Image (cartoon, helix red, strand yellow):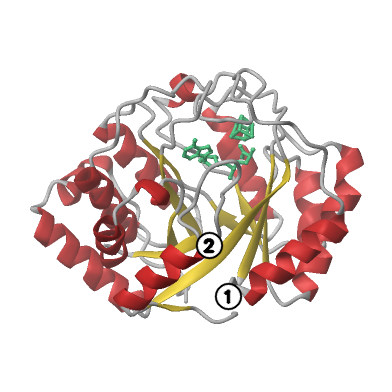
Amino acid sequence: MRKSGRPQIWIVEDARSVYERPFNDLLFHAHTVHRAHFDPNQIQLSKLLNIKTGGCPEDCGYCSQSIHHRSGVKPSKLMVPEQVIEEARKAKEGGATRYCMGAAWRSPKPRDEAAIVSMVKAVKALGLETCMTLGMLSSEQAKTFADAGLDYYNHNIDTSERFYPEVATTRTFDDRLQTLALVREAGMKVCSGGILGLGEDVNDRIDMLVTLANLPTPPESVPINMLIPMKGSKLVDAAPVDPIAFVRIVALARILMPESHVRLTAGRASMSDEMQALCFFAGANSIFIGDTLLTAANPGDDRDSSLLRRLGLTPETAV
Ligand code: SAM
Ligand code: SF4
């Protein structure tokens, strides 16, 4: 568990020299840090549900739910709480300890707040940790959701401040940091990470992690995504990510944020078992279970349970 006191402040040059170590040294260091803070044979299982699909006015270059992209994703209205609760019940039976609900919004509208609050309360009553990812929040909205008992709020910074304008233009990097600060101020835990494969360079990847690690309190949960090139999106033809470079970033995330859960997130469906095993050794200790993420493929329960069994990884029990 997180110990009190401010974790170390990192400078990019130091993070870069850690990243550039020989692969075996980097992974040995990351695994040692991992073991010092977590049971290396446990993995936190989350389930992600899209509670409102498509029709988003933002222009995130990677996203199938943006109205700026002809992705073919059919927009849907906000799901009714009863449907969400039914899905959450199934997720709990499937071993999830956290239930993450995402909506393709720039920000939730006041008219949506009551439904969001009732979803949080009902999912929490099932004994699941709750997480929402609804876009940018006002301080009042953050407080409303915190008062409803929302445990985590996800809001990924996605890349470095320098590269961010290449990823999205309908909001700024500072807008992202502002929402993270409001979430923290309201007393919720923070889930924030990013994506590799957007066209960024290695300095951007390292900068992204240093930004997260140097937040007044680093995120309790850090999703590391590998771009899934989505039909109709700006990044559909993006170059694939070098698997070794990806594992290096997972290891660096572990070293920079020793007490955070590092989540191996989007892209796992196209990762080999060996690549995933290397990421777990490097300190990734959380995944999304199930066949789909928001609108993209996920390995699914059969492949995941076979991999976790062969690796001897067991699910973390409810906190
Ligand atoms: N609309 C909310 C927002 O933008 O904050 C919810 C975001 S939801 C958690 C989507 C997150 O998953 C994005 O922040 C991004 O990091 C990741 N993601 C979305 N599409 C992706 C893709 N095609 N490939 C990899 N990661 C993706
Ligand atoms: Fe909208 Fe979120 Fe997709 Fe960006 S990532 S376009 S904010 S749904």
Q: Quadrant of residue 123?
A: bottom right
| Residue drawn 87% across the image and 43% down it | 112
Q: Is residue 257 visible?
A: yes
What residue did someone put label 2 on?
Answer: 289
Within 10 angstroms of label 2, few (less than 14), some, or many (20 or more) residues? many
Q: Amino acid under label 1?
A: Gly
What residue did someone put label 1 on?
Answer: 95
| Residue drawn 49% across the image and 52% down it | 298
Residue 198 x %, y %: 39, 29
Q: CA distance from mark 1 to mark 2?
A: 9 Å
Q: Is residue 263 left or right of residue 79?
A: left
Q: Is residue 214 visible?
A: no
Residue at the farthest left position: 22
Identify which residue, 212 or 159, lies in the foreground: 159
For marks 1 and 2, the one nearer the N-term is: 1
> Which quadrant: the C terminus?
bottom right
Residue 134 x %, y %: 70, 43
| Residue drawn 49% across the image and 70% down it | 44
Within 10 angstroms of label 1, few (less than 14), some, or many (20 or more) residues? some
Quarter of the render that holds ligand 2: top right
Q: What secondary structure is marked by label 1?
A: loop
Picture layout, residue 67 above or below residue 108: above
